[in-house]
Amino acid sequence: MVAKIFDDKILLSRAAAEQAASAIRRAIATMGRARIVAATGVSQIAFLEELTKSAGIDWQRVEMFHLDEYVGLPITHPASFRKFLIEQLIRKTGIQKYHLLDGDGDIVDSVKRVGEALISAPIDVAFLGIGENGHLAFNDPPADFETEAPYLIVTLDEACKRQQVGEGWFSSVSEVPAQAISMSVRQILTAKEILAIVFGSRKAKAVRACLEGEISPMAPASILRTHENATLYLDKDAATLLVPR
């Protein structure tokens, strides 16, 4: 895994978007289409703003998959990841082929339907964040590194819930849903290319564990070090606890 550190989140987002756009254009040129996994949350807003402005992408040839979603949260809620992706990516690009996880509908059917579509062909590039507790998607520690199921129903830990409150999505921990649908760790790692975008001092401990600690389910993002084509985009605040090289 390659780690790149930038002075601020805007420069970080622009650089990540350039790499993401290149991966999408390359897949379309080679295969006639690009299959992507899109994340949500504060870390993705500036990145998606830059990506959706990128030139030379035929978005009609892009197929998008949803990384994770809360269970029981309506699409009208400000924290809905479906709402986020529709507003920040789908409407801006006109993507026609996308697979959203229906967290407040038939959960079993949604997991089965989207999961089958997901594993039907390789993913060209996945966009991720890293949680304050080191989670990937909603795979909180200790994460399941073994299951091959494309999606899991997971129970959110307290640290994860506090992060959602801290980022302004909910007013209290009690409002955060207890469960979520999450892409599995092994499924994430099947992507040909992974871009993880992380900024802010609140993520510094997770970044240190990801890059310098043991590869362990207790630090889920550490598994990214096993991927041959993963890039971690950091701002200076997120990188403050790393040992200088």
Image: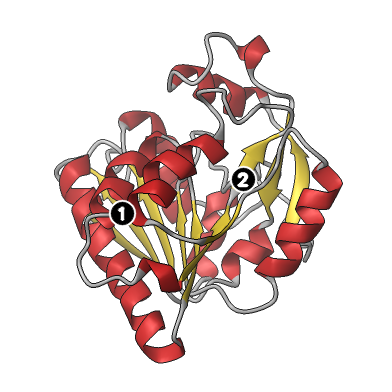
Circle 2 residue: 68
Viewer-side label of 2, 1: 2
Expressed as whole percent of the image width and height from the top left, the position of residue 207 reads: 41, 45
- Give 216 or 133, whichever is nearer the viewer: 133
Q: Is residue 240 visible?
A: yes
**Which scheme is used to colour this image of the protein?**
secondary structure
Q: Quadrant of the C terminus?
A: bottom left
Expressed as whole percent of the image width and height from the top left, the position of residue 153 reads: 78, 43
User: What mark, if any, has residue 125 been given in the picture?
Assistant: none
Kind of residue at disc 2:
Asp
Dot 2, how many residues are within 10 Å of its Cα: few (below 14), some (14-19), or many (20+)?
many
Pick whichever of labels 2 and 1 is earlier in the sequence: 2
Q: Is residue 170 left or right of residue 193?
A: right
Circle 1 residue: 233
Q: Secondary structure at mark 2?
A: strand
Kind of residue at disc 1:
Tyr
Asked if residue 36 is positioned above or below residue 48 in the image, the reply reads below
Q: Residue at x 55, y 20 (%)?
A: 162
Expressed as whole percent of the image width and height from the top left, the position of residue 100 reads: 62, 50
Expressed as whole percent of the image width and height from the top left, the position of residue 191 reads: 54, 71
Q: Is residue 44 left or right of residue 224?
A: left
Q: Residue at x 67, y 64 (%)?
A: 186
Counting the numbered discs, the total is: 2
Q: Is residue 150 visible?
A: no
Q: Is residue 33 left or right of residue 49?
A: right
Dot 1, how many residues are within 10 Å of its Cα: few (below 14), some (14-19), or many (20+)?
many
Q: Residue at x 83, y 51 (%)?
A: 109
Asked if residue 38 is positioned above or below residue 21 in the image, the reply reads above
Q: Quadrant of the N terminus?
A: bottom left
Instruction: Give the quarter of the image for residue 230.
Output: bottom left
Q: Secondary structure at mark 1?
A: strand
Q: Residue at x 39, y 34 (%)?
A: 42
